[in-house]
Amino acid sequence: MNTATYTVTGMTCGHCVTSVTEELSELDGVQEVQVDLPTGAVVVTSQEPLPESAVRGAVEEAGYQLTSASS
Amino acid sequence: MNTATYTVTGMTCGHCVTSVTEELSELDGVQEVQVDLPTGAVVVTSQEPLPESAVRGAVEEAGYQLTSASS
C-alpha cells in the first residue's frame, strides 16, 4: 500500500473536488482519494506507487494543475 | 416573453454555473438561462414572469443564494 500527497491548484468548490476525485480514482490501483479543498492537498492511496505523469494527467484531465508531489 | 435578471452569489466555477443553469431550466416556462460567473448575473427568459419564490427555490436547490432580482 502506498500513500502520496499532492498539491492541486484551481479547485474552488465541491464540484471541483468531485471532478479531481473521479479522475484520480480511475487510475489503476487507486483505492482512496481524499481532497482538502482549502489547501488543495490531495492524498492518494494506491496499491503501488503511481507515476507522477499519470497523476498529473488525471488532474489536468479534470481541469486543474498539479503543483507539487511528495510520497 | 419575459426576461428577468437576478444576482446569485456563491458560484465559483463552471460547475457552479452548470448547476444553477440546470435548476433554473427545470422551472415551468423557462426558455433560456444565461449566467455571468464573474458578476453572478443570471438572465432568465421565460414565457411568463416567474414567481421570485420559484427562482429563489431553484437557486437554493443548486446550493447558492439569490441576492437580488429585477425584471
Image (cartoon, coloured by chain):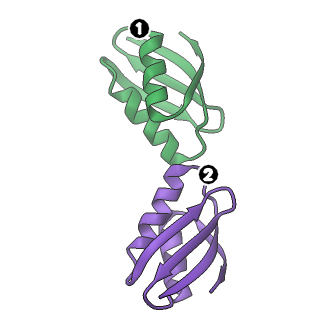
Chain colours: A purple, B green
Quadrant location of the C terminus of chain A in the rendered image: bottom right
Which residue is found at the position 68% from the left and 56% from the top?
A38
Q: Which residue is mark 1?
A: B49
Which residue is found at the position 51% from the left and 24% from the top?
B43
Q: Nearer the viewer, residue B26 or B32?
A: B26
- Whole-angstrom CA distance, mark 1 to mark 2, is 33 Å
Disc 2 residue type?
Thr
Does label 2 lie on the same chain as label 1?
no
Chain ID, mark 2: A
**A13 shown above or below B31:** below
> Residue B6: image x %, image y %?
56, 20
In front: label 1 or label 2? 2
Q: Residue furthest left?
A: B28
Helix, strand or loop for disc 1:
loop
Q: Which residue is mark 2?
A: A12
Which residue is found at the position 43% from the left and 25% from the top?
B58
> Residue A31: image x %, image y %?
41, 77
Q: Nearer the viewer, residue A17 or B9?
A: A17
Q: Nearer the viewer, residue B70 or A44?
A: A44
Helix, strand or loop for disc 2:
loop
Q: Residues within 10 Å of mark 1 (few under 14, many from 20)?
A: some
> Residue B50: image x %, image y %?
41, 11
Which disc number belongs to residue B64?
Answer: none
**A49 shown above or below A37:** below
Q: Residues within 10 Å of mark 2 (few under 14, many from 20)?
A: some
